[in-house]
Amino acid sequence: MKKLFLLLLFHLCFTDANSQIAPDYNLDLEQWRKGQPLPEKWFQWGRGYTVVTDSTEKYNNLRSVVIRAPQEIPSGAFGCVASSLPAVYEGKEIELRGYMKLSKVDGAAGLMLRIDSKAGTFQFNNMQQEGIRGTQEWKQYSIRLPYPAQAASIYVGALLTGKGEIWVDNFDLFIDGKPLSEAPLRKPAAALTDKEFDNGSGISFGPLTRSLIDNLAYTGKLWGFLKYYHPAIATGDVNWDYELFRVLPGILNAGTKVEKEKVLAQWIRKLGPLTPGTAPSPEGEVVLRPDLTWTEQATFGKELATLLDEVRKA
């Protein structure tokens, strides 16, 4: 009995470990709950079109999704079934494959692949330029896009414009030619593993005197300048918020200006060497230029002033 229990426990642990490595995104559309219009983890984009699960017409297995145009199509309307998954994989190129069946399509049909960063859309293709229309039996289609290192989300699906209807089934994703289940995971940025100050900075000080306020403002300006100009911070390997908490006690406890600048210089040098360069000259119309005159007007010592100039040019 004990051996059986241990065997079952091992099986559960092994299954759980593999599910974390290769999560099921329901790309084959087979996971579906009765009463729900679409398979689990899928949703509808667009308006006016009917987008539902279909168990009558399918490529294989039990079900597909059908996108059906209305009798009267409002201007700009389209139908799309989509799903999203995190961009946690390492690679240079991403490919979406999927099967489609068309019936009397007079607009355009296609698979849809979109890669987003946290700031917006990086890459997008919905095959609308390929003019896939008419009536066709089941056929596999494919989209390939560059897969940027800054990718945060992957959207997959299929889209229909104009009249007609399409069925879609059996989506698959590949990273650099490997199925998603075999694609290597990205190593998380070191900044995300820095947990030292998750429960607070632990920094305290007395009344806000003019001297203390000036000191904090002075440090804040340098912290902001380094955040946007030092190449090491752009890598994602430095939790710059927490670095402020690390350096601030030393700055606040520095007795003289020389001591304070020594702390700051050591802080900057700890970020690593800088590649020599010259400040780029912006081309075209510049709407807003960063005001760095304060770095020139401040009475920094020679070592700190030289370091800041190197950072600006790097």
Image (spheres, rainbow, N blue to C red):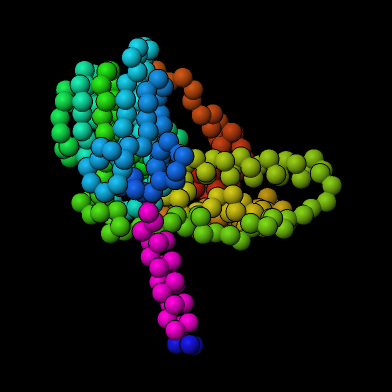
Frontmost residue, 212 versus 160:
160
Which contiguous range is marked in magenta? 4-25
Judged from this view, the residue extending furthest toward the front is 56
In the figure, residue 119 lies in which quadrant? top left
In the figure, residue 58 lies in which quadrant? top left
The residue depicted at 20 percent of the width and 51 percent of the height is: 177
**Which quadrant would the C terminus be assigned to in this image?**
top left
Frontmost residue, 172 versus 264:
172
Whether residue 181 is visible to the viewer of this picture, yes or no, is yes
**Rendered location of residue 107, percent (x, y):** 24, 18
Magenta: predominant secondary structure element? helix
**Rendered location of residue 176, percent (x, y):** 23, 51
The residue depicted at 54 percent of the width and 59 percent of the height is: 194
The residue depicted at 57 percent of the width and 41 percent of the height is: 224
**Rendered location of residue 288, percent (x, y):** 49, 22
Frontmost residue, 115 versus 230:
115
The residue depicted at 37 percent of the width and 26 percent of the height is: 50
Frontmost residue, 295 versus 173:
173
In the rendered image, residue 24 lying in the magenta stretch gets the answer: yes
Judged from this view, the residue extending furthest toward the bottom is 2
Residue 12, above or below 124: below
In the rendered image, residue 185 lying in the magenta stretch gets the answer: no
Residue 256, above or below 227: below
Residue 8, above or below 313: below
Q: Is residue 11 left or right of residue 209?
A: left
Residue 303, above or below 217: below
